[in-house]
């Protein structure tokens, strides 16, 4: 009986560890392999997604013409050379009031981070932290509010509540207070 228990216990431990590592439905709420889309100022669609096979970078590609399917090469949105940004989960993208795209993700520090186009359809900024403590593997939504022309980002905080962060003015800075 002792030999049988010694054989079964390691097998059960391995099986339990295998199930414990599986994240909750990443296609619905997580970061890896989640695809989000936004439109450039000229109406071309741009796709953003994370790739769990490459240390969590965010990639993007865009359509060559308005109404076309994104087919450019795949490009990585990275941080500065001395401090690369690797998001952990959550991904959102939207167009800014002036047509620049903005991308949002949860960092390993639990904060909301963003990168944005420096000019409409142009090159990208480095990733920058905004604030907050975001629950991992939960949805992150970003949109341009039509009445205020400001971006809003909605997340689930580590406190379990839904929170929204807003731009203070169109094409401007961000609030540090979550609502």
Image: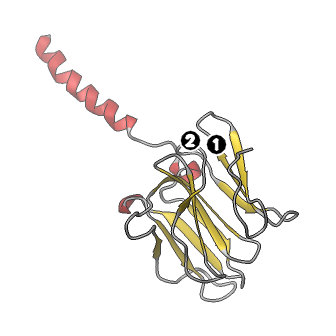
Q: Residue at x 46, y 49 (%)?
A: 108
Element under disc 1? strand
Residue 177: where, in percent of width, then height? 70, 46
Q: Is residue 91 above or below residue 65?
A: above
Which circle's residue, 2 or 1, is located before the other in the chain?
2
Identify which residue, 9 or 171, lies in the foreground: 171
- Residue under pointer 1: 156
| Left or right for 159, reference 108 | right
Q: Locate residue 69: give its quadrant.
A: bottom right
Q: Residue at x 53, y 45 (%)?
A: 137
- Residue under pointer 2: 135
Given the current orientation, which residue lies at the most extreme bottom position? 65
| Left or right for 177, reference 31 | right
Identify which residue, 175 or 94, lies in the foreground: 175
Q: Residue at x 70, y 41 (%)?
A: 162
Is disc 2 in contact with disc 1, using a CB cutoff of under 8 Å?
yes
Quarter of the picture containing the C terminus is top right
Label 2 and label 1: CA atoms lie apart by: 6 Å
| Left or right for 75, reference 141 | left
Q: Is residue 98 above or below residue 4?
A: below
């Amino acid at each position: 009986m002792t030999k049988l228990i010694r054989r079964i216990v390691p097998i059960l431990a391995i099986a339990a560890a295998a199930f414990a590592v599986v994240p909750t439905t990443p296609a619905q709420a997580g970061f890896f392999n989640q695809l989000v889309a936004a439109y450039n100022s000229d109406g071309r669609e741009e796709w953003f997604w994370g790739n769990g096979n490459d240390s969590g970078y965010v990639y993007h590609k865009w359509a060559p013409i308005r109404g076309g399917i994104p087919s450019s090469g795949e490009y990585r949105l990275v941080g500065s050379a001395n401090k690369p940004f690797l998001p952990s989960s959550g991904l959102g993208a939207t167009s800014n009031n002036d047509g620049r795209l903005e991308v949002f993700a949860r960092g390993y520090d639990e904060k909301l981070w963003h990168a944005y186009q420096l000019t409409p359809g142009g090159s990208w900024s480095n990733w920058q932290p905004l604030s907050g403590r975001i629950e991992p593997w939960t949805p992150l939504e970003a949109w341009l509010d039509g009445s205020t022309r400001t971006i809003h980002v909605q997340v689930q905080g580590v406190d379990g509540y839904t929170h929204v962060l807003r731009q203070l003015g169109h094409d401007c800075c961000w609030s540090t207070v979550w609502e």
